[in-house]
Image (cartoon, helix red, strand yellow):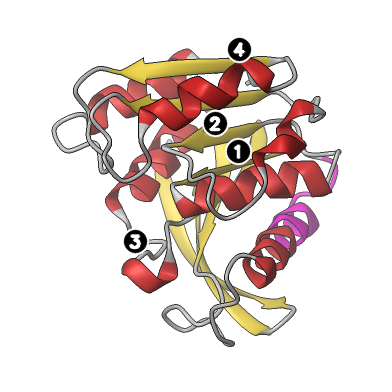
Amino acid sequence: MMNKVQSVQFEGPAGRLEGLLKFREGIDPLALVVICHPHPLYQGTMHNKVVFAMAEAFCGLGCAVLRFNFRGVGLSAGNHDFGKGELQDALAAVAHLRQRHAGTVCHVAGFSFGAGIALQAASSDASLASVTAVAPSFKVFDPAVLSSLSTPKQFLQGTSDTVCPPEDLRRLYPGFLSPKSVVWIDGADHFFAGHIDRLKSAIREQRQFVGL
């Protein structure tokens, strides 16, 4: 079975948003995943190599995966909104994917800034099945919300990350409500240079934790 990538557009609160939908042609997806990209003001887009790798990993597990550009990025309408509007964009992406595949469980994931948005999305929509946060930034929201978030949360973090330091996650993680899981990727920097394959395999290995 061949993986297919389809360009999509859908309505967000600030106007039309663009995305790429990756899926296995000819079969119904096992689950849905929306992936949020890193910070728009630092060249973050849905084409980021970590976001692409995440999409490949989840698609390999039988999921239909939507990565999209936040408002003001690429062909997406609107302007950067410092996290508030981007959260609404993520929830619009979830709604769009669910509309295409009614009744199929949906997960949310993200990288860096996008991981922070994904964690907030899970806090805003209790029906999301899990959240996967890769090198999460805790600067875009108050991580205290994770002390009461019962949605399964998996974190993947490089130990040599200088952008989103692993010390932040180590300090905050004990206060997060279970179920939760963390995978430390030894030697990986923020962009997982030389460790992309390990990142993808870690996502696949965690499939049972998130119910895939």
Using the image, tell me which numbered label, if any, was put on residue 35: none
Res. 22 visible in picture = no
Using the image, tell me which numbered label, if any, was put on residue 27: 1
Give, as a single range, the part of the protein colored magenta. 94-103
Q: Secondary structure at mark 3?
A: loop
Which class describes the residues within 10 Å of circle 4: few (<14), some (14-19), or many (20+)?
A: few
Going by the numbered disc 4, the residue's amino acid type is Gln
The quarter of the picture where residue 128 lies is top right
User: From the viewer's perspective, is 192 left or right of 93?
Assistant: left
* Residue under label 2: 62
Could you tell me which quadrant the N terminus lies in?
A: top left
User: From the viewer's perspective, is 210 left or right of 51?
Assistant: right
Estimate the spatial distance between the alpha carbons at disc 1 and disc 4, rounded to whole Å: 21 Å
Estimate the spatial distance between the alpha carbons at disc 1 and disc 3, rounded to whole Å: 25 Å
Estimate the spatial distance between the alpha carbons at disc 2 and disc 3, rounded to whole Å: 21 Å
Q: Compare residues 60 and 120 and report the one nearer the observer.
A: 120
Q: Secondary structure at mark 1?
A: loop
Estimate the spatial distance between the alpha carbons at disc 2 and disc 1, rounded to whole Å: 9 Å
Which class describes the residues within 10 Å of circle 2: few (<14), some (14-19), or many (20+)?
A: some
